[in-house]
Image (cartoon, grey):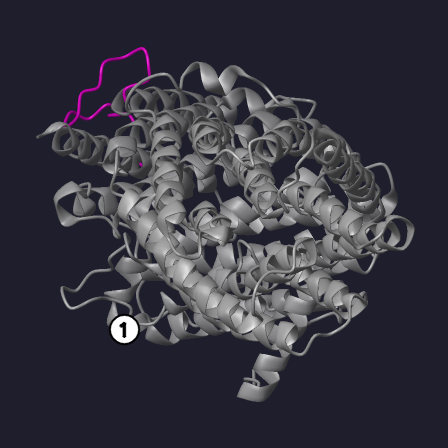
Amino acid sequence: MLQPNPFERYQREALRIALSHYVTNGLSAALGLLLIAGSIHLLLGEFAAAAASVGVVVCVPPDQPAPKRGKFWQLLPAFLLGLPLFWAVQVLHAAPILLGLLLVPASFLAFLAGGWGNRGLPISVSVMFAMVFSMAVPDHSNSATNLTTCLYFTLGAVCYLAWATLANALLNARYRVQMLADTLMALATLMRSQAQQFSPDTVDETGRRAPLVGTLLQQQAALADQLQAARNILLESPSTLRRQQLADMLMAVLDMRDHLLVCNLDLDTLKNHPGHEPVLSTLRDILAALADEIDALADALMLGRAPVPFASHRPQLENLQWGHDSTVSARGAAPTPAILAMGMSSRIGLMNDDSLRLVALARAEMAPNVDLVRANWQLFVSPTVWSWEPFYALWRWNAPPLRHAIRAALAMGTAYAISLALPWGSHDYWILLTIVVVLRGSLAHTLERRNSRAIGTLIGCVLAGLLLYAHVPVGVLLLVVTLAQALAHGFAVRKYLVTAIAATVLGLLQVQMLNAGPSPVFDVVERMADTLLGVAIAWAFSYVLPSWERGQIAALVKRTLAAQARHARVALGLWQLQAVDNAPELQWRLARREAFDSLSALVQATQRSLSEPRAVRPPLEPLGRLLALSYQLLAQLTTVKTMLLQQRGRLTPQDVELPLRQAAQAIEAALGSGSLPPQIGTPATPALEWSVLGDPFDGDLSPWLLRRLQLADHIARQLQANAEQVLRELAAP
């Protein structure tokens, strides 16, 4: 397939960004700000609009694409926690010491919202915004004016809560398409990386792949996160035909992810056999072509067009020449390369079928599996209620959210004390704002934002300075603030440099509308100095009470082993062959999701540790092997599960019952979660011996099943050995 020229590629990427869910969400937030602030400006005046816009800005961070159910409650904590702090800062405006005494404990409580995980971070930012922007409001001499300012703040916040809830409901259909398209593009990216593994030049200088830093692991983790975000929206209330089609397409993506995972099986053996380069080259080209077709499907969905059907690659797969070795192996002997190549071709064929199914569903040429979709939606949508339970476990010294809250409170207190001593202390809030957006729970994320914040502030200061120097009308400033809000919110987790530039323009113009300060030119220099100081303080305090990833790896490793053991138990359950409903399928999907999610968390923690000092890094080499083995075990068990479900008519339960039970017990025992004690190094499944391995496209699949079970048993033992090594090295001083 011809590759697009660079201009076409950049144009395509720009169009994808413009049509993405995060840009849509940013524009929705910005439109809400424009309508609310503009209306209040017309009715109540310039200051009322500026104060109300602060209420809007405080409620914007948690406004992300979400299920319709629970959207209002997702936004409400930002307002409920932000309002009293906004008022308290107003009251203490003229008492710097008392304000500092409020700022430190309030910052601690705000950042403690990290106990809610990813849902809590926007709440922390919102609460801090309420205090920081309240410091930018002009000092009032009487409580009546303070109360009026808080009423304007409340008016803006309440209006935005209603706007965001309504906009999320109206955009729900669009968000479903965009989330699915993003998931398809993430899948296509992973498919291209997997296709590259079929080339002989994908090994490092030691002759082996390095899975720890390899793109496959990172892309698998990214796809797992994207899939959960898509599940939350696509699997909610699949009550219409269109929703069912999109949800069933997501189910197909999950199947393709599984087939793609097992493409690594036996790949090293084939690559070491010189006679199969043409076969691997053809399989690579087919997989890359499928990735292009998935990308084209995603683009069509984003543009609202019916995707163009593509021809099946089955004929090309069936005409492959397997080589001159035998396509049948002797009893108990290792399978020949030709048999392994045929098995790999079969997996890519299944991906080809799933791709055709995706296009057919998108074109409404195939009826969705309504029963499976409806059974899945209640189980796989993340909870939307707020609970105090996550905070019960935070009150221990090594809890990362607790340490980060203390670290952030100390950083805010130090920055506030320094800002009071500066000659331009009238804008002390800018240093604090920089710390809020730069200081993160991990050193890796803090360093990632440090440079972007400094460069983005410089560019944003210049842009805002030019606007202020030109003395543009308030209406123009309001439009610029709206655009800046859209960019700052939309790209916050995608491209922070864009967010830093837009947020700087937003902050400077917001403050200018609240209280016209000194010379705009001096403000630009001042803001840049404040930003550099804030970045330096945030960077320095990222080493105070650090929560090194090393301290979290042990728990993540144990979670991974437990998830692998449960997945093995469910995937190898013989009862699924006699089931008459979707219960076994749902249990397996839940177990599979936890297995992928646990691996995603471990991959991300390992990647973050690369930014930390060498002395505190976890043992990277055994961790890399553990991750690679975990994905291999998932691949083996996924292959077994596929055989049990899709080929149940060609398997005799009496013949596979004992091997399945033995393999499940052996894997659970090896991973330390079964009723049997782990006995690494001792064969646990002596009955597993495959007979003649024939054509995987036809014939008896029992020998293939037995081989996969024995390989899974062997990988589980290796996985446990690597896990024990990781835990030993983590426990060492």
* Label 1: element kind: loop
Magenta-drawn stretch, dominant element (helix, strand or loop) = loop
| Rendered view: 691 above or below 182 | above
Residue 577 is left or right of residue 391, and the answer is right
Percent of width and height locating residue 275: 29, 73
**Residue 632 visible in the picture:** no
Q: Which kind of residue does numbered mark 1 sit on? A: Asp
Seen as rendered, the residue at the extreme front is 141
Task: Please tell me which residue is depicted at 54% across the width and 43% down the height of the picture.
Answer: 132
Q: Quadrant of the C terminus?
A: top left
From the image, tell me which residue sits under label 1. 201
Q: Residue at x 59, y 24 (%)?
A: 584
User: What span is colored magenta in the figure?
Assistant: 672-693
Picture coordinates of residue 210 (x, y %)? 24, 57
Residue 686 is one of the magenta-drawn residues: yes
Q: Nearer the viewer, residue 316 or 186?
A: 186
| Viewer can see residue 543 | yes
Question: In the image, what residue occupies the spot 33% across and 71% down?
Answer: 276
Instruction: Report the front residue among 678 and 471.
Output: 471
| Residue 331 x/y as whole percent | 28, 43
Q: Is residue 583 above or below residue 426?
A: above
Q: Is residue 265 left or right of residue 159?
A: left
Report the front residue among 465 and 227.
Answer: 465
Relative to 611, 39 lies left or right: right
Q: Is residue 509 above or below residue 731?
A: below
691 in the magenta segment = yes
